Amino acid sequence: MPTHDILVAGCGIYGVTAALELHARGHRVAVIDPGPIPHPLAASTDISKAIRAEYGGDEEYTILMEEARPGWLAWNEEFGETLYHEWGITMFTKGEMQPGGYEYESYQLCKRRGHPIERLNADEIRRRFPAWNADLYTDGYFSAHAGWAASGRVVEVLAEKARRVGVGLYAGQTADRLLRDGDRITGVQTREGETFHAGTVVVAMGTWSWLLAPELRSVFKSVGMPVVHLKPANPSLFSPPLFTGWAADVARSGWYGFPYHPQAQVVKVGFHGPGPELHPERDERVVTDEDIRRLRAFLAETFPALADAPVVYTRRCLYCDTFDEHFWIDRHPTLAGLVVAAGGSGHGFKFGPIFGGLIANAVEGKEDGRLRKFRWREAPAGARGQEASRFHG
Ligand SMILES: Cc1cc2nc3c(=O)[nH]c(=O)nc-3n(C[C@H](O)[C@H](O)[C@H](O)COP(=O)(O)OP(=O)(O)OC[C@H]3O[C@@H](n4cnc5c(N)ncnc54)[C@H](O)[C@@H]3O)c2cc1C
C-alpha cells in the first residue's frame, strides 16, 4: 500500500467527512472500512436521522447546528437529490412545558436566536397534527428549520465523491492493530493482512473505536437502541403537513421518530434513552418482545392510529456513548500521530456537514474553540450523560 499522510479508519459520517475535508486541504488520504459502504451495522447507516437544533439550554450545540444547516441545504444542491428533508419537527409535552425541561429551554433558546419556531396548544395540535393524542400532549412547538436526513444514502454519496476526487477508499479492510514507533503511531495493520503506513491515523470507527484504541474503553460505551419500522394503515395521516419528525416528551420518555418515509413506506420510531451495553462484534443485536411491548404501549397513548400497525423491520443500533454524551474529537494526549473522531452518543449525524472541518482542525492542530467540548478528557466519578434530549431513566 502507498504511504498516506492520513489514514482514516472507519467510513461512517465522521470518517467520510474527515477524509473529504483533509483531501480538500491537500493531504494524501486513505480510508479503510470492513465494508460494504455504508456498512449495514454502522450507526450512520439507516433510512433516516433527525436533524434539529433543539438542545435545551445548551447553546453550543444549537450554534453548531446553525452552522451545519446551510451545509445540509448545500449537499442537496451539490448532489442533485434531497438528502435532507426540511419538513420540520414537532416537540410535544404531556402538560405544560416547564422551565428547566428540554422542550421549554429549547423553545426559549431557539426563539431568542431567531429560529422559525411556533408554540402550539392542545387545540392547535389537534387541528394541525391530528395523529397526536392532544388530550394528553397539550403543549409544545413546531420548529421549521429541522427535518430528517437519508443517512445511509448520505454516507453513500459522500463515499462516492471521496472516490471520485482521489481519496483512497479501501472497503474490505478491517483495522486490527495500530503500528507504533515508540510514542508515535505510524499506521495500521488490518485483519486482512495489509499494512497501511500514515503520518496520522484517525480512528473514526464509531462504536468499534475502543477495540482499536483500548484506552477509550473507560470513557466509551456501546449501547444498543431499538429502531422499529411500522406500516400505517393511513399514510397521509403520518405525512407532512399533518405529521413531521417528532419527539414525544422525549427527555422523559425516550420516544422520537419520523414521518412516513416516501421510499421505505414506513413510519420509523426510535428510543433515545438507556439501553443494554453490548459488545460491537460479539453480541447479537436484537429488538426484544419487551421492546415491542413498550413501544405498543407508547403508541396506544400517543398515536392511537399507529397502535396496531404491523412491524415490518427492527434493528438494534449501537450508540457510541461517551460518559458525558459529548463527542470525542481530539489528538491522543500522549501518542503522536493518533486522532480519535467518534463518540456520536446517539446525536451526531446532524452535524455531518461540519464534522469534516472540526476533525481536520484537530488533525492539523488548528485552534478551534468549538473543539473544547469534544476534547480528550477523564471521566470524573459519578459522571452522567448531558445530552439534553436524552431520557436518562
Ligand atoms: C439508533 C440510532 C439512532 C440515531 N439517531 C440519530 C438522529 O436521529 N440524529 C442524529 O443526529 N444522530 C443520530 N444517531 C447518532 C448518529 O447515527 C451517530 O452519531 C453517527 O452516525 C456516528 O457516526 P460514526 O462515523 O462515528 O460511526 P458509524 O456510522 O458507526 O461508522 C463507523 C464505521 O467504522 C467502521 N469500522 C468498524 N470496525 C472497523 C475496523 N476495525 N476498521 C475500520 N473500520 C471499521 C464501520 O464499518 C463503520 O462504517 C443515532 C444513532 C443510532 C445508533
Image (spheres, grey):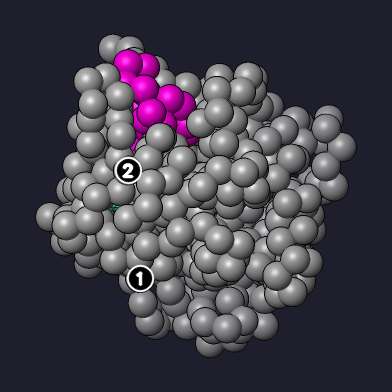
Residue 250 x %, y %:
52, 46
| Res 354 visible | yes
Look at the image and say whether residue 333 sits in the magenta stretch.
yes
Q: Residue at x 54, y 36 (%)?
A: 359
Q: Is residue 309 found left or right of 111 in the rendered image?
A: left
Look at the image and say whether residue 295 sits in the magenta stretch.
no
Q: Amino acid at mark 1?
A: Pro
Residue 80 quadrant: bottom right
- Quadrant for the C terminus, please: top left
Q: Which structural element holds mark 2?
A: strand
Residue 23 x %, y %:
58, 48
Q: Residues within 10 Å of mark 2 (few under 14, many from 20)?
A: many
Q: In the drawing, what numbered circle is on residue 146?
A: none
Q: Which residues are magenta?
A: 319-339
Q: Residues within 10 Å of mark 1 (few under 14, many from 20)?
A: few
Q: Amino acid at mark 2?
A: His
Q: Residue at x 43, y 25 (%)?
A: 331
Residue 214 quadrant: top left
Instruction: From the image, tell me which residue sits under label 1.
Output: 36
Instruction: From the image, tell me which residue sits under label 2.
Output: 197
Q: Is residue 56 found left or right of 301 in the rendered image?
A: right
